[in-house]
Image (cartoon, rainbow, N blue to C red):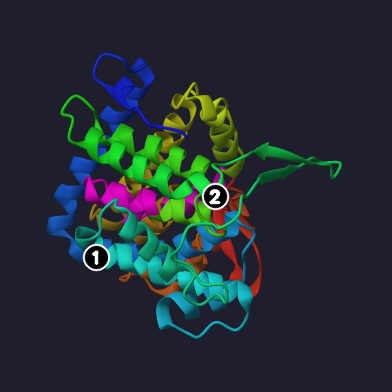
Amino acid sequence: MRYFDYSFLEQGMLPAGMVNLIGAITELRVRGAERRGDYPDVFTRLESIAKVQSVHGSNAIEGIVTSESRINAIVIQNAAPLNHAEEEIAGYSAALNMIHTGFDALDIRERDILRLHEVMLSFAPQGGGRYKESDNTIMEVSAAGRRSVRFSPTPASETGETMEQLVLAYMDSRDNPSINRLLLIPCFILDFLCIHPFADGNGRMSRLLSLLLLYKNGFDAGKYISFEAQINASKALYYQALKDSSANWHTANNDYFAFMSNFLVTLLKCYKELDTHFAAIQSGKVSKKQRIEATVLHSLLPISKREICYILPDVSPTTVESVLAQMLGKGVIEKIGSARNTKYIARQ
């Protein structure tokens, strides 16, 4: 059975690049915390948008999709799901809300992990809240359609005990003052994914647990800029990092740093986008046109006219539409989708 030792995270054993990432994230976290106390309404608006993007992004990674209008209805209006995909989406929305509103009462303990899984699959017929009862395999399909085993997770017979060991190792390490808790989070998440403790929903659970751990340790950018959507936007890099860091996992000879780096870069992107969004929203020295341009150009993800209007409530939809048309005409942005699903992104 696999045991866990995070002592390699102790001070003095980290690559310089990892230290630089932590420094950049910490600086932006402090800046965001200072702003949040002065401008709570701005963060409330960003949180509402991020919830929708998170539910969409985390499920899209797994190929679970529905229309943007239905995502909004499910997340914002608590609309009843109409099919299996929407059942999965509604469950993720409920579990995400559980973390957003009650992360202080939750912890990395088995009963809370099982409860989150139960809520996440509460609309699905198979249900959740229990570990897998049969072995599972992570497959990959080549461009030619050839299937192969990418990774063989922990056997079902060992899952309960291995999860217990993982949770205890995390608790022990987070109490070690020589271990940076931000670095500990992706190590826990990688090991969770390699155990693959559930019959269904492991990837989505890993993202929920990532947010829970980040929030509990004071890193809440993902509440306002979707962490899951950032992963989905760079999905190939995420899966490559996961593959690299899971090699030799069963013999405890794997290298966590590829996954750690990808995790921290994703978090830094959230903080950077929050910083640039906020600057665009709050600046009183620039025109409405400039604020609209900054909001679109600084967004790492496609953004809709409705989202821009929600972020900039003092700007009329007509003004937003006019500026977007000018930006399209100049070729600085491109349009994705059509009709009500139209979004805009800076041209690369």
Q: Which label's residue is closer to the chain start, 1 or 2?
A: 1
Question: Considering only vertical position in the picture, is 167 above or below 104?
Answer: above
Whether residue 342 is visible, yes or no, is yes
Residue that appears at 43% across and 82% down: 78
Could you classify mark 2 by the number of other residues whose Cα lies within 10 Å: few (under 14), some (14-19), or many (20 or more)? Answer: many
Question: Considering only vertical position in the picture, is 113 above or below 76?
Answer: above
Question: Considering only vertical position in the picture, is 296 above or below 68?
Answer: above
Residue that appears at 41% across and 77% down: 76
User: In the rendered image, which residue does mark 2 sit on?
Assistant: 156
Camera-nearest residue between 56 and 4: 4
Residue that appears at 29% across and 30% down: 22
Kindly indicate the quadrant of the structure image that contains residue 284: bottom left
Residue 99 in picture, x, y percent from top left: 31, 62
Camera-nearest residue between 157 and 284: 157
Amino acid bearing label 2: Ala
User: In the rendered image, which residue does mark 1 sit on?
Assistant: 102
> Which span is picked out in magenta?
209-234
Residue 85 in picture, x, y percent from top left: 61, 72
Residue 97 in picture, x, y percent from top left: 34, 68
Residue that appears at 24% across and 30% down: 180
Amino acid bearing label 1: Gly
Kindly indicate the quadrant of the structure image that contains residue 36: bottom left
Alpha carbon separation for disc pair 1 and 2? 30 Å
Front tag of 1 and 2: 2
